[in-house]
Amino acid sequence: MKFKVPVGVNVLSPLSFWKAEDFLGAVRTFCEFLPDLTPEKWGWVEPLKQPFEPDHLDKMVHANGVCETAHWKRAKRPKAEGGFSTRWKSGSPRVRDTHANISFNTELGQVAQEALITYVKQSSIRVTADIALIDVVSESYIDFARESESALYGRRFYLVTHTLRHWLPDVFWVTVFGPAYVRLFGKERLLTAPAFAVEELGPEMVYVQLTEHIADTVTHPELLQSRRDAFKKHVDHNAFFVSGMGYDRLKKGPFGDVFTTPIFDLVPDKRPWE
């Protein structure tokens, strides 16, 4: 689905979403706080043909109780598409398992900014997110987003655990720093960061909003960049990606030998068939 100016939202949870109560809880939270983005179709694979029924979300779980990544789309305004991704389980001790990942894109200006903010806050709290974001891959930002691997797939933000174990791509227009990053940066330093809004969402969770309006990502990119720079200077940490210092993370050795990275405490879990 094409968006003229897509707004991306990501929420990464240390849960696996293999359990129906966790997976469906994430879907219900989305429906509760973003009713204007109620999906029309969903499916486990393309093409997405199954009608989305908010009153029958149990259909998104297999009859044997197995949950797997579900994709969805909404073609009418406000347009949107996204997915609820379960943990990817690795057989390699070097690559390791991943977070569950809630991600979606919608069109700038079609959904109220406050609705997106409220959803990200509530979703992050409910799934104990390690990190969450709201941002726009503007024309002036796209090259850095690709290089830092926050937007490898066109103008779509999609953070993945494999990248976060090597570097944090950036601070975004909205970033929720969860337990792993609060421990890495320090809560007090995050709470005193120079930003339009900073809010403590929990003992180990801090919300940061760089500017007042999300449209600043397009209309005032220089302002947003200055706020990104000021935030990273304040945090004074080498966790953030620096242009020209990237490497092939799939072939690299130990984590953290270029950038400082957190330790993610993924919730231990087994898939229902194991």
Image (tube, rainbow, N blue to C red):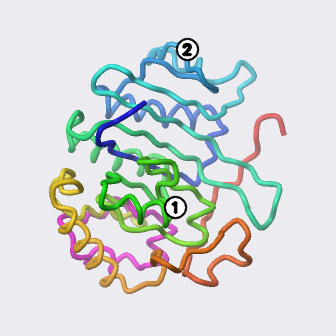
Quick check: 31 above or below 57? Answer: below
Q: Amino acid at mark 1?
A: Glu
Quick check: 28 above or below 154? Answer: above
- Looking at the picture, how far across and down is residue 236, in whole percent? 37, 86
Mark 2 crowdedness (10 Å alpha carbons): few <14, some 14-19, many ≥20? some
Give the Cα separation between the discs numbered 1 and 2. 32 Å
Q: Is the Cβ of the residue at disc 1 closer than 8 Å to that at disc 2?
A: no
Q: Residue at x 51, y 15 (%)?
A: 56
Depth order, front residue of 251/174: 251
Magenta span includes 126: no
On the rendered structure, is 99 left or right of 216?
A: right
On the rendered structure, is 158 left or right of 69?
A: left
Secondary structure under tag 2 reads strand
From the image, state whether disc 1 or disc 2 is nearer to you.
1
Quick check: 195 above or below 118? Answer: below
Magenta span includes 190: yes
Closer to the chain start, of discs 1 and 2, is 2
On the rendered structure, is 96 left or right of 224?
A: right
Q: Where does the magenta region start and end?
A: 176-202
Q: Residue at x 21, y 54 (%)?
A: 218
Q: Residue at x 49, y 66 (%)?
A: 147
Q: Quadrant of the N terminus?
A: top left
What residue is shown with label 2? 50
Q: Amino acid at mark 2?
A: Gln
On the rendered structure, is 224 left or right of 18?
A: left
Mark 1 crowdedness (10 Å alpha carbons): few <14, some 14-19, many ≥20? many
Q: Quadrant of the C terminus?
A: top right
- Looking at the picture, how far across and down is residue 167, in whole percent? 54, 72
Instruction: Please tell me in which quadrant of the rendered image residue 123 appears.
Output: top left
What residue is shown with label 1? 149
- Looking at the picture, how far across and down is residue 125, in whole percent? 41, 51
